[in-house]
Image: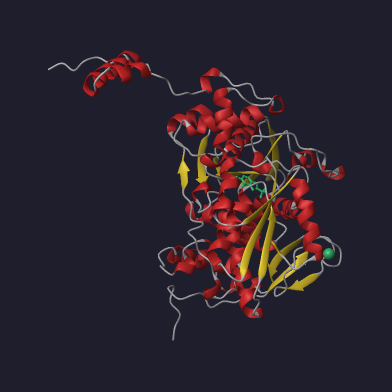
Amino acid sequence: MSMSIHDFPAYRGVLEYVCLQCQARYPQDELLYTCPDCGGVFLLEDSRQESLKELSGAQWRERFDARAAVKRRALRGIFRFYELIAPVLDEQDIVYLGEGQTPIIPSSPALNTAVGHTVAMKNDGQNPSASFKDRGMACAFSYLQSMARANDWDQLLTICASTGDTSAAAALYAAYVGAPLTSVVLLPAGKVTEQQLAQPLGSGAVVLEVPGVFDDCMRVVEYLADNYRVALLNSKNPWRILGQESYAYEVAQWYDWNLSDKALFVPIGNAGNITAIMSGLLKMHDLGIITALPQLFGVQTAHADPVFQYYRQPPESRSYSPVEVKPSVAQAAMIGNPVSFPRVRTLAERYEQVAGDGSFQVVQVQEQAIMESMLLANRHGHIACTQGGECLAGLLRAKEEGRIDHKTTAVLDATAHSLKFIGFQDRYFQNTFAPEYGITPQAQWQNRPETVIDPEVKNRLAADAFAREAAQAVVERLGLEGKED
Ligand SMILES: *Cc1c(COP(=O)(O)O)cnc(C)c1O
Ligand SMILES: [Zn+2]
């Protein structure tokens, strides 16, 4: 029987965990998280990837384009790019909750003018738990489901530390998959938004609060992973990185596989997302699916900028050190010691080898600029969260510093939905930021509901008299003119 595009893909790869520190390799069928030999972080590599070159770049492009019309659930989301992501999973294990295939919205002409650049936002907040983390979780949970089935496990506890969105995603996927998987999330007390806390609670996860910041939670989780049988869902988990590569594949496909005139902006927290995007771009380039790599910009707030601090040093003498974070409105990226830093270092080197010096850069932005960039974008019809605002602030900074070609289209990663971080907007509008944020709200960016009519009037008048009175108040507020007939 011949294969059709509507069948589940036949190709099976052989994935191996590759330690970025000691180069040790481990087979895919172990639940590994860091290297047992040296503690280094892993990337997963398909040791059969060369055989994918039996198809030309053009044939792969055609296959992925054709697959966009396929109605099989398992191929509707990130696994449209199955062969590039985790081609070891069986169809029955793939979890699909509608993640991926998020739209890229070109900015309005007015916003392009305001920014002085052609801009587009990829709305990753339009994922099921409203952030890009669902991409990685879909892959990690598909893998866990395959492991639980293959090993006949009757219980598997998943655990993660989180700045909010990882736990929302983990809890959602765990709730869907159900037994034998259960989910526990560790959050830094008071350091996630109300909405982000509500999400895992609503999904029924056990939510444990730890005093401190994300980095403190991470240390607790690492201790647990080293000493107990739990499945770790932090971005040290390389299966998440594979799923998050889908972002790069989708951007390429959206632009008809031509990224030569694009610049991608990505906020950096734990650095899993930028790792995945670089890895995905390099994979497509290696297979001839794209022939030019885009310029890639990581963006960090001055309040949590260890990756920026590393890359600002001259290449010969760079040294990495974690930083102490200060409160940031880009709270999902407020991380002083990103676990994926070694991955970034490795991949950025490869990236620059292929695309040239300066093809990967990191820019630093101020808190004030993050807030006002977010408000600017959203006043032009976007739905950016603070981290999406951080990307726009990064573009403005890169322009100021002359680091970006004016002919490119800047594609900004709007990593979560604005509603998840809406409390920061409230603080800006109501001027209630604690001084550590270093934000002074400007009247031009504030917005508040206005009272048009005294509530007393409502009590005094009958319904239709009140309606006339209230309408009159609106007329005055807006300076409306009557219709002439
Ligand atoms: C997790 C997260 C980030 C940071 O991504 P990393 O992979 O940790 O660098 C940025 N924005 C949002 C909304 C996030 O949830
Ligand atoms: Zn190692």
Does residue 166 sit above or below 396 in this rendering?
below
Q: Position of residue 67 (x, y in %)?
A: 45, 66
Q: Quadrant of the N terminus?
A: bottom left
Residue 170 picture quarter = bottom right
Q: Position of residue 330 (x, y in %)?
A: 64, 38
Nearer the observer, 31 or 464: 464
Nearer the observer, 59 or 5: 5
Q: Quadrant of the C terminus?
A: top left
Nearer the observer, 454 or 233: 454
Does residue 394 sit above or below 184 in this rendering?
above
Q: Position of residue 80 (x, y in %)?
A: 50, 64
Does residue 175 sit above or below 127 in this rendering?
below
Does residue 378 sit above or below 85 in this rendering?
above
Q: Quadrant of ligand 2?
A: bottom right
Give me the residue at 78% from left, 54% from top.
Answer: 220
Give me the residue at 57% from left, 34% from top.
Answer: 423
Residue 93 picture quarter = bottom right
In this rendering, would 106 be left or right of 27? left
Residue lying farthest bottom? 1
Q: Position of residue 351 (x, y in %)?
A: 70, 53
- Taking the image as drawn, is residue 216 in sight? yes
Q: How is the image coloured?
A: secondary structure
In this rendering, would 141 be left or right of 127? right
Residue lying farthest front? 460
- Taking the image as drawn, is residue 338 in sight? no
In this rendering, would 119 be left or right of 354? left
Q: How many numbered marks have been drawn onto this rendered protein structure?
A: 0
